[in-house]
Amino acid sequence: MGQFIVIILGFLLGLSYPLGIEPLFFEPSVSLWLVGIITAAYLLTGYRLVNYYGQKILTSFNPSLNGGRPEQIIQTCSERSRTITGNYYRRLQTYRVSLLFLYAFEVYVCHWPLVVTHYFKLNNLIFITNFLIILPLLMTYILTWLPLVKMDRWLTGARWTLKEYFLFQLRGWFALIIAPLLLSLLFFDIISYGEWLNCLVFLYPFLGWLFGFIFIMALYCGAPFGLKIIWSAKSLPAGSLRTRLENLVKKAGFGIRDFLVWPIGRGRIANAMIIGLYPRWRYIIFTDTLLNNLTEEEIETVCGHEVGHARHHHLFQYFLFAVGYIFLLVVVEWLAGRWLAPHNLALGTFLIFPVFIFYWVVIFGVVSRRFEKQADLFGATVTENFEGFIRALEKISRLNGYSRSLKSIQHPSVEKRVAFLRETQKIPELVVQFEQSLKRITLVFNIIIIIGLAGVIKVVVDQSKTISLREVQLQARELAFQGEKYFLEKRYHEAVACLGNAIKMEPDEAAYYVVLGDALVGRSGRITPEVIALYQKASNLQPVDPLLRMYLAEKLR
């Protein structure tokens, strides 16, 4: 989950540019070289990290097995090696988070978005432009797999080739995070191409968020079928294991479409998950590594854990988390528009980052880790096999090469999960206390979502009151667009007339003054005091677009 946060925040970093920061220095070729050098340095750091901890891990095993098969080494690992492995994963998390700072440097210091606009004239291809902007983030993240595959082989005993490892990672990450993000960009790009839709969203801004809600619904509904195709998941064959899992599902009074097997090949990824909000669209997926290395009894307890997520409505709660975040963004954007001056709206964009981190890292993390414990309890209870589930947790941790103390935003460490299960066995009253505390936390969060919905309704009402003003602004933009078209066609008299009328309707738009000044220069063939005054007026309005600011600085020099 932490990697998801890094990628999503990276998307926000790249696509929130420009933020009103005047480039102190910008030379496209220099920026391009800097991005390449920084990326190479980052990857070199990854190699050094892997080699340093790899040697420490190997020397901590039985010396007689050094040079032996990886799975032999893993089976004889010592407590010291587990400690070193835990340290490695903590350093790896830091390394991955540092990718955000690297990309932020590329965006705001190297001005990578300006490099894209300089080398690629894609004014009408918003999706491709945005993709090129986030490309350094994606490529750097993908290239980190080059050093990490070596450590993965050491820690898990995997035997896949570099090609197999890359294909697995691409299919896994593409399906879970990259594809939804790119689809969201494409979705809103398509909306922007429809003139009537664009006008409608401009007049009624809240419709943009409604489209976002519809998109999330579509993702949740389509995810089970999309993942099945991308992961080449097949139905679990008939046999004693399938019969056992079907009986468990019936015992839990739970609906499911199918059990699926995700083939990993020569890799060693032991995992299971449940996907789909509705029974007819719901699957429980197991990797073949998990099925091949756990007993049927242990697999049954893992399945019980996944069923517990659905029985306690965790999947629906996760959906509410996503919807609640949309509500939160609507309110934050509205407050930024009311409290900040127009030229300081960039500060409102920066608010997205602390809001995102607090919401998804802090709040979601607290609730999600408790959901995992609740699902653990359900899985162990419904199968009446606490020890079998604990063995399954321990085995999965070893198969994946994880330290028992390793935790994530979404999951507690195996160490804490096992301790929790053993405590509840000894003191049954703890289960009641835990369930009650989780109900209170969930209730508070749902109340917050309801308050957020009330805030959204308030925003919709306020925006509805200013429709007439936006209608005037829309007319001004249409006139300005026509004026710019006339300017490009060198029909300067018509351009001046259109832009003059646009300024009367929307006097606070800096770009109108710039194009009007350029049209006057085209008509007269010289820069007059009137033109200088127009450029100065545009500069005084403090436009956010850095290209426009640099153009004005050159004209006023």
Image: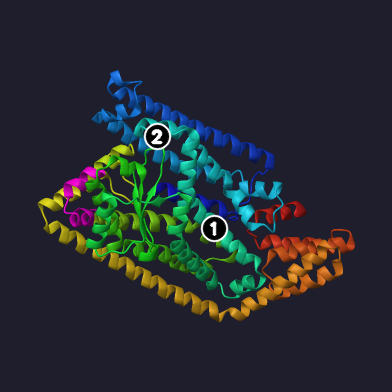
Hey, which residue is sitting farthest front in the picture? 238
* Whether residue 344 can be seen here: no
- Residue for badge 2: 152
Q: Position of residue 320 (x, y in %)?
A: 38, 66
- Residue for badge 1: 183
Categorize mark 1 by other alpha carbons within 10 Å: few (<14), some (14-19), many (20+): some
Residue at x 34% of width, y 39% of height? 400
Tell me if 380 is positioned left or right of 282 in this view: left
Hey, which residue is sitting farthest left in the picture? 426
**Please, what secondary structure does the residue beneath circle 2 have?**
helix
Tell me if 146 is positioned left or right of 93 in this view: right
Q: Position of residue 53 (x, y in %)?
A: 37, 29
In the figure, residue 250 lies in which quadrant? bottom left
Residue 329 position (above or below residue 82): below
Residue at x 29% of width, y 19% of height? 63
Residue 24 position (above or below residue 450): above
Q: Reading the chain from its start, which is encountered first: label 1 or label 2?
A: 2
Amino acid tagged 1: Leu
- Along the line of sight, which residue is nearer the eye, 501 or 86? 86
Q: Label 1 vs label 2: CA separation? A: 30 Å
In the figure, residue 305 lies in which quadrant? bottom left
Residue at x 30% of width, y 27% of height? 72
Q: Position of residue 216 (x, y in %)?
A: 47, 64
Tell me if 386 is positioned left or right of 528 in this view: left
In the figure, residue 488 lies in which quadrant? bottom right
| Magenta-colored span | 376-393
**Please, what secondary structure does the residue beneath circle 1 have?**
helix
Residue 38 position (above or below residue 255): above
Q: Position of residue 501 (x, y in %)?
A: 76, 74
Amino acid tagged 2: Asp
Residue 113 position (above or below residue 223): above
